[in-house]
Structure formats: structure tokens, C-alpha cells
Amino acid sequence: MTQKLHSLQSKEERPQRFTFPFCYEPHPLSVEAAKKVRRYVTTHEQLMTDAANGKMFGVLVVEKPAAAGGQEQPQLGFLAAYSGLLAGRNDWPWFVPPVFDAQQPDEHFKKTESNISAMNDIISTLDPVDPLAIELRERRRGLSEELQQWLFRQYRMLNAEGKERDLMEIWHDYHSKKVRRKFPFPPAGAGDCCAPKLLQYAYQQGLKPVCMAEFWMGASPKGEVRHDGQFYPACRGKCLPILTWMLRGLDVDDNPMKDDSLLFPLNDPLAKLNILYEDQWLMIINKPTGLLSVPGRESRRSVWSIIRQHYADSDDWALAHRLDMGTSGLLIVTKTREAYSLMQEQFAQRRVKKTYVALLDGTIDTKQGTIDLPLKANPIDRPHQVVDHENGKTAITDYEVLSVNNGITRIALYPHTGRTHQLRVHCAHQEGLGVPILGDDLYGRPFTPSDLYPQRLYLHAQEITFTHPLTREQMTLHIEPDF
């Protein structure tokens, strides 16, 4: 155990509760442990060569049991982990081991994998309609599903209550029948992320978890936005079911987003909309930052919940489009089904022109240009979007730098398409501008609010031009941001 458990000398006060892994500010003890991991990796050439390409690392600060009649409180130490493989291995001695080692060449997983590969080689030489090819594809499918299920059964995950379940049991207990019909197995790589590996080893060794954090090293991956040295929450698609089980028995922090001051309570009687234009078919509002477009939680206010509470006298009302919760600015509400249908037609044909203003957390080399990066949802880490040049949907944004002040760039963004998080990803991704929008908690860097820059996402829908769906009048509305 001494190879895996590393000393941590610190005067920092221990947290009263364990880290909520899906939304957290890293505790100073976790930050100190992360620095030690980074120092270790950078002094080992083989590890650093691979980490430089991009790798997620994790730390778990733990208490070692106090010796009988010894010290007043248990001593602190920390465990370290990496996601998946590091330099082709999952067994580097300084880090915790995998929950299950599927890499052994003489074990069932590798042998069956080799058989499937041999089938692929044979199938590739046959005509697709050859009866033998059809039979082999069916056998391959059955063998693959059987192997997947066998593999996930080997991952037997402990929790703080000392109970154990395999990944198939955890997956089935967490998700509804509807989800399980579509996704009968956990995602590939489930159980090999940092957090499950760290907690599993701590439980096995009788160590008490104190706090935890995950951080990125090296280059950003091709599809996603990751920044070297930045801390990140655990991925929800793979880890939410697993960690929900593994954290049972620990006193865990509440989800900070549950009481986020930037979100509005649903039943506030003073909740009214800032209406900039209204007629019998349309309402155009200036949505404030922090207000959801449509309900995302039962207890959260949204544009739609306010409409239903104070304005709508018909089920025909609808939002013609949406803005992210953090984005402020112009939002079109339709009052009739005909108006909604005609506005949707304009959006689909890209005849609605929009201008956004944003503040970038840094500077860029160009003054204007076009970003063309196709996007799709990350299925294992929603609501994040990823760049996917093969399967992503077209996403195009023109941009123009307006000014630069103290390392903050004011920029105008002109989207040709309306993909989820399009502007945020196009700004932050290394193939786009490579500089995130200030205050972006999904794709940006840590942001410390100030009097000059209060807490918010610095993105504002400033102008929109469209054809009125009924009068056919060309309309342009403009509202300046408050930043």
C-alpha cells in the first residue's frame, strides 16, 4: 500500500463533507495533491510524453486509520489515478490499479477479443451477401454482446457501506426500463475513470475518503474542450450511476447547482419579462442571464414558466428558439401555432440573422473570420458538445473583433446555424478561436468574479432580423448588453 498512498503534509482544515463530484470547487487539499501528481508525471519522461497528448488525472485525499492510543486524529495521505491507460499501461505502480484488469493477454477478455478480430478478418474477404458472411456477422454480434456483459460483471464496485455490486447491476438499478431498452450496457470504459478507481482502492484498503478532484494535463482532445491544469467534474454518462452507488455511506456535499444564486425560483410573484415588442402574434423579450428558456428543474423559473404564470391565455404559445441559461438577450415568443410554424420555417431556412456580443477570456490573433466546426452532443457527458468532423452537424459562425482591453476581447459573433452551445464551443475549441467566453463554466477557465466582471456568462444576443410571420414586415430588434 505504501507505493500507492502518498504523504500529504498540509495545515489546511479538512472539509466537513466529501466532494460532490459532478459540480465542485476543488478543496485546497485536493489542489495540493494535484500539484504533487503533476510534479511526479513531469519528472517521468515516458509518462509525460503520453500525458502531453492529453490525459485526465484524479486525486483522492484520504485519512489513514489512527494507531490505537496514538495520534489525536488520523493522518492524511492521497491516492492518484489516471483515466483509462497511460503510456499503454493500466498498472503504473505509483497510481491505484484498475478495478478490473482486462489487459492480461491470457485472460478471457483478450482471448475472446482475438477471436472477434479473426472473424472480422474473414468477413472482410467475403461478399456481404454470402451466407457465411451473414452467419459470421450474427455470431460476432452475439459474441460481442456476451463479452461486454461478461466484462461489466467483473467490475464489482464497493461503496462506503461495504456493499458490492457489479456494473450491470448498478446500470440496471439506476436507469429506467426505457433507457435500458435503448442502452442495455454501460458505456465503453465505464469503471476505468479516475473517481471509481480511486474510491474502489480506498475502500479496499480501509482508507476514509476526505475530498477528491480531477484535472486535465496536456493538449485538448480533438473533439472536446479541455484546458491544461484545469479541474473538471466527473463525467455524468459513465460515472453518475457508478458514483451514486459508490458514495452511499459517505456524507457528501450538496449539489452546488441546487441552490445556485444565478437561477431563479419558480414561484416568485414578481417574475416578469422585459418585453421589447409585442403584437397579437409575437412577443420579443430581453432574457436576463441566469434564466432558463424552458423548465429544466421543477423548482427553477424559466421564460416558459413565467409566460404560463403571467401571460399565456392559450396553449398555442411557444418559444420560437432558445438561449442558454447564462446567455442574455433577444428571444422570440410566438402566440399562435401559425406564427410558430412560420418562424420555424425561417430558422430552418437560415433566414433569421442574429448578432451576439461576447467577452473572450484572452486575445486572438485575427480580427475577423469564419469558424466552420461540426458539432454533436457528447453522449456520455451531456450537455457538453464535441467537434466531430465525420458525424457532427454543420455549425458555422462569422466573427469580428470589436476591441481589446486588459487582455479581454470584445467580439461580435454572427451564427449561420443554431446548434447547441455553438458559439461557446467555436470560441473555446482549439480549432476555433482557442479562447473561451468569459464566465463559461462548461468550456472555459476558472473565473473569479469582480466588481468589473460579476459572475455570469459574458454572451449576449444583441440583434435579430427576421420577417414577421403574418404581416411579412422585415423586422430588426437591437438591445445592448449590460457589459
Image (cartoon, rainbow, N blue to C red):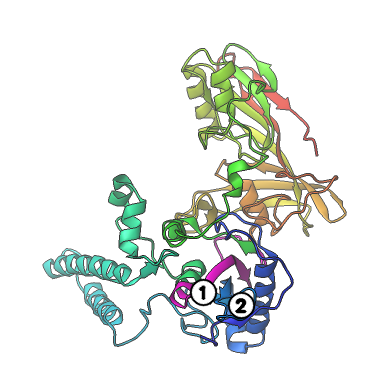
Residue 207 has which mark?
Answer: 1
Residue 33 falls in image quadrant: bottom right
The Cα–Cα distance between marks 2 and 1, rounded to whole angstroms, is: 9 Å
Residue 482 falls in image quadrant: top right
Residue wearing tag 2: 77
x, y (%) of residue 178?
Answer: 30, 45
Residue drawn at (72%, 74%) of the image: 10
State the quadrant of the C terminus.
Answer: top right
Secondary structure, mark 2, is strand
Residue drawn at (58%, 30%) of the image: 302
For this rendering, which residue is in front, 124 or 98?
Answer: 98
Residue 464 versus residue 26 in the image, above or below = above
CB of mark 2 within 8 Å of CB of mark 1? Answer: yes
For this rendering, which residue is in front, 437 or 403?
Answer: 437
Does the rendering let one see residue 416?
Answer: no
Describe residue 200's horizontal placement relative to residue 140 as left or right.
right
Check disc 1: other Cα within 10 Å, few if <14, some if 14-19, many if 20+: some
Residue 73 falls in image quadrant: bottom right
Check disc 2: other Cα within 10 Å, few if <14, some if 14-19, many if 20+: many
Does the rendering let one see residue 414?
Answer: yes
Type of the residue with mark 1: Leu
Q: Earlier in the sequence, mark 2 or mark 1?
A: 2
Which span of residues is magenta-colored?
A: 201-230
Residue 124 has which mark?
Answer: none
Most distant residue in the right direction: 406
Type of the residue with mark 2: Gly
For this rendering, which residue is in front, 327 or 479?
Answer: 327
Most distant residue in the left direction: 131
Is residue 207 on the magenta stretch? yes
x, y (%) of residue 292?
Answer: 59, 35
